[in-house]
Amino acid sequence: MKQADFILKSSNIYRGVGKDTFSGFVAVTGDKITYAGGLEMLERCLGADTKVLDFGEQLILPGFHDAHLHTFMASLYADPRVKVSFDDTSEEQCVAGLAEVADLVPKDQWLIGAGWYHSLWDRPELPTKASLDAVYPDRPVVMVSFDCHTMWINSCGMNKLGIDRNTPNRPGGQIDHDANGELTGIFHEADATALCKQIYDFPDEVVEGLYENFMHILNRYGITAVCDMSMMAEPGLDFLRTDIYSRMEQEGKLTVRVHMYPTLTEDLLRPMEMRSRYQGPMLYCNGVKQFFDGVSPCHTAYLKEPYANAWYPGDVGKTTLPPEQMRRLVLKAHENDFSVRVHTIGDQAIHLMLDYCEEAAIRYGEKPYLQHTLEHLENLQPEDILRLARDHVLPSCQPAHAVCDPKGVERDLGMERARLMWPFRSLLDGGSTLAFGTDAPVVEVNPFVSIYDAVTRQSARTGQPEGGWMPQEKIAPWEAVSAYTHGAACAANAEHLYGTLAPGLFADLCVLDHNLLTCDPEEILETACVMTMVGGTIVYQS
């Protein structure tokens, strides 16, 4: 047995799988775990220079892995010059809140707000440019919706972007007009995301500063790995800043392992270049990302049957890409050994994607070294719960989404379909391995909030609804923690590298001041990270 650089002792150690903890220690030598077990091996691991850290009853576990986020936008939202609020109750309150940051931003630069969600407003209607124009007539303003699928822009901003009433819709997008054909200032899906490159045009040194700050935030929560997902379906607009990541790695500032998922395109040129260059130990690329539909509140999630509150006859939402095009993309990615991760929220988008994954395995053979993953999976057809496990397609979910707006979900889809919204219990019982994340910046990157939401099915912000929304889909605390560690590593095809505390894996772990597996659910939200280690290096201590 090699002498360890670190010995981490505790009476509560969780391996990342199963429901039990054990008392003992974890030995770390170099960047790897060399032992995780009882105290009987302690003397064999101790050396003259071994640092022994005794955490008493505090919980040692694998580092959290956020299985789905967008680093660029999450880093931007963490900047104090951006006004982020998820709790506004009206259009007017959203506009008024911008005053808090208006003086921090030069008037020729974009004033940015985020987090608005009109379904939760006292008057649940989409906003318009008029309210922004009234306060900010001579500077560009953009307000990004809570799910990042819709932008609300003032007239000055649209002029800066070169948009007028004759600007056509992009495929998979929509620009709203009023009854007179005038722009309302609302841009949906592809027409919103296509504007990002112009709006978020920051100097590299600014972006690197944002990323460095975000890495500190991640480590402070015990997060040691993330999946940075392409922000949009448009080629060249994935916002995966490989240049920033590479420079940070060279400078020793990259303290989180990053799995990058560029946009799945017909030519696969960028993914192939990234795969050839990024194979660890801190930066990886082995998969691709696409979008197949939108979101339920805007009726852009693709359903089998019409929305319960249909806006027009046959309102089933829509796909962001023609189904045949998506099918070709999935087949091509599988053929070329790329794991595919696809945004699928509506039940029919999920159903079709499973068809395409099945066809890919039949046509090009099952490839155990790939891990196709569906992202979000908010509304499922009952038979597809079992198909996910059978086809080895992993569900990657964000628990905080499930309790964001239960009444809105019931209004959009009706009670019968709502019973299979975010069905975590059913997915686990059906044989799937769950992966958890946040979709940050859509919700905060705090893993304790997501674990609480999955365990209680109540909003961490409001505690509602009492008893939990669709409580039959609650899962046990250990299942939620496992989804955030081992399950997320599986989604990244990295369970052979980390995600459990086992000899030979990277020493990526964290220590918490509460035992999440046994504490009262309300205490989950009070949990703090005591220490975070990545590759045998302590990157955070409280």
Image (spheres, rainbow, N blue to C red):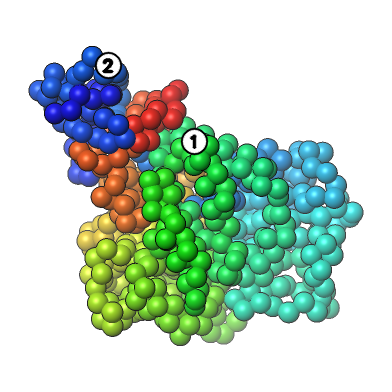
Residue 465 is situated, as x and y percent measured from the top left of the image, at 45, 48
Image quadrant where one finds the C terminus: top left
Q: Does 197 sit left or right of 159 as displayed?
A: left
Residue 49, numbered circle: 2
Label 1 sits on residue: 252
Q: Amino acid at mark 2?
A: Asp
* Residue occupying image coordinates x 79% and y 42%: 105
Residue 136 is situated, as x and y percent measured from the top left of the image, at 86, 52
Q: Most extreme residue toward the top, as rendered? A: 48
* Disc 2: CA contacts within 10 A as few (<14), some (14-19) or many (>=20): few
Residue 107, numbered circle: none
Residue 421 is situated, as x and y percent measured from the top left of the image, at 40, 62
Q: State the count of labels.
A: 2
Residue 473 is situated, as x and y percent measured from the top left of the image, at 32, 55
Which quadrant of the view contains residue 530? top left
Q: Front-most of 270 and 484?
A: 270
The reply to whether residue 533 is visible in this rendering is: yes
Which quadrant of the view contains residue 391? bottom left
The reply to whether residue 54 is visible in this rendering is: no
Q: Amino acid at mark 1?
A: Gly
Of the residues under marks 2 and 1, which one precedes in the sequence? 2
Q: Is residue 47 above or below residue 347?
A: above
Q: Please report contact status of discs 2 and 1: CB closer than 8 Å, yes or no.
A: no
The alpha-carbon separation of the residues under discs 2 and 1 comes to 24 Å
Q: Most extreme residue toward the left, as rendered? A: 40
Image quadrant where one finds the N terminus: top left
Q: Is residue 354 above or below residue 207?
A: below
Q: Is residue 355 above or below residue 78?
A: below
Which quadrant of the view contains residue 277? bottom left
